[in-house]
Amino acid sequence: MLKSGFVSILGRPNVGKSTLMNELIDMKIAITSSRAQTTRKEIKTIYTDERGQIVFLDTPGITRADSKLGEYMYSAAVDTLKTSDLVMWLIEPSTFIGAGERNILEVLSRAKVPVLLVINKSDTCDEERLGKTAATYKAALEEASVEPAGCKEFELVPDKNPIAVSALEKKNTDKLMSLLYELLPEGPMYYDSEAVTEETERDIAAEFIREKCLKFLDKEVPHGIAVIIDSMKERADGSLIDIDASIICERESHKGIIIGKGGATLKRIGIAARKDIEDMLGIKVNLKIWVKVRRDWKNNLNMLNEYGYR
């Protein structure tokens, strides 16, 4: 029988959730960055092979909300638990459980969904530190009465629960996939076997542009940015696709930083984003980007809806 199910990837900002999901499905769908709060909404991807089908739900990092956008991001993460068969709680090697982790423990305790603890970035530490991390979180999960996936108690068994991986170095990711199939129930295929994501090409293109903003812009500017695709049309002769996009920022001073001297920064963003979009679409792209100021858009519900945070 085939195995199938929905797997929510939960964790604090910048623990590598999107990088791990991209690695597990062997395709770049979710954008990645070294900056916190890169992912802003649930991103659904589908992996299918002869064993069955896994639907991954990548989520924003769970953290304290400081705006209407932050409230949306928190809800987007927590709401995935309502439809999940299994939660992968992604953590970094550490024996310190702070307020952020306590918040996630409370969320998991209320959700009553089986949890697989995944220690990411295992390439950054030795076996002793991994063992201490596993023991610390095992105790915390049991204290919070969280249900472990696949067993009556959290196991300290290599490649079980917790499992240590490195998304960046592709370490133990195959074993993680095997474990997920082992833990998921027998079930139907929820999507066509060729499906990879529910994200539209326009959505992914907008995210690629935002990813380059995160890469090339400093300090707080990228976190006040949204990107929308105004138009996306293939030319009649099929030679290329014309894309018009807008970068939304909160201040006039930010607009100047995004554009850069003589338009240099905006050009760098456009060149890098265009390459990723062309790789995704398999066709040449003519990308034009404008920068617009919309003050305090992160607290304006109408604007949030318009920019895809519904």
Image: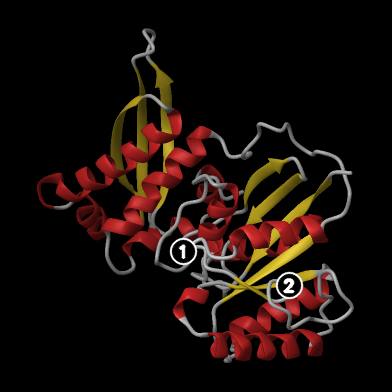
Up-down: is 71 above or below 52?
Answer: below
Tell me the quarter of the picture where residue 33 sits. bottom left
**What colour scheme was applied to this rendering of the protein?**
secondary structure
Residue 160 badge = 2
- In screen coordinates, is 124 left or right of 89? left
Q: Residue furthest top?
A: 237
Residue type at tag 2: Lys
Classed neighbour count for the residue bearing mark 1: other residues with Cα under 10 Å, few (<14), some (14–19), many (≥20): few
Give how far across and how far down residue 302 sits, in percent: 55, 48
Closer to us: 278 or 24: 24
Identify the element where label 2 is drawn: loop
Identify the element where label 1 is drawn: loop
Residue at 48% across / 83% down in the picture? 125
Residue 36 badge = none
Residue 175 visible in rendering: yes
Residue at 32% across / 38% down in the picture? 275
Closer to us: 250 or 208: 208
Residue 75 visible in rendering: no
Tell me the quarter of the picture where residue 127 sits. bottom right
Q: CA distance from mark 1 to mark 2?
A: 19 Å
Up-down: is 310 above or below 133?
Answer: above
- Residue placed under numbered mark 1 in the picture: 169
| Mark nearer the N terminus (1 vs 2) | 2
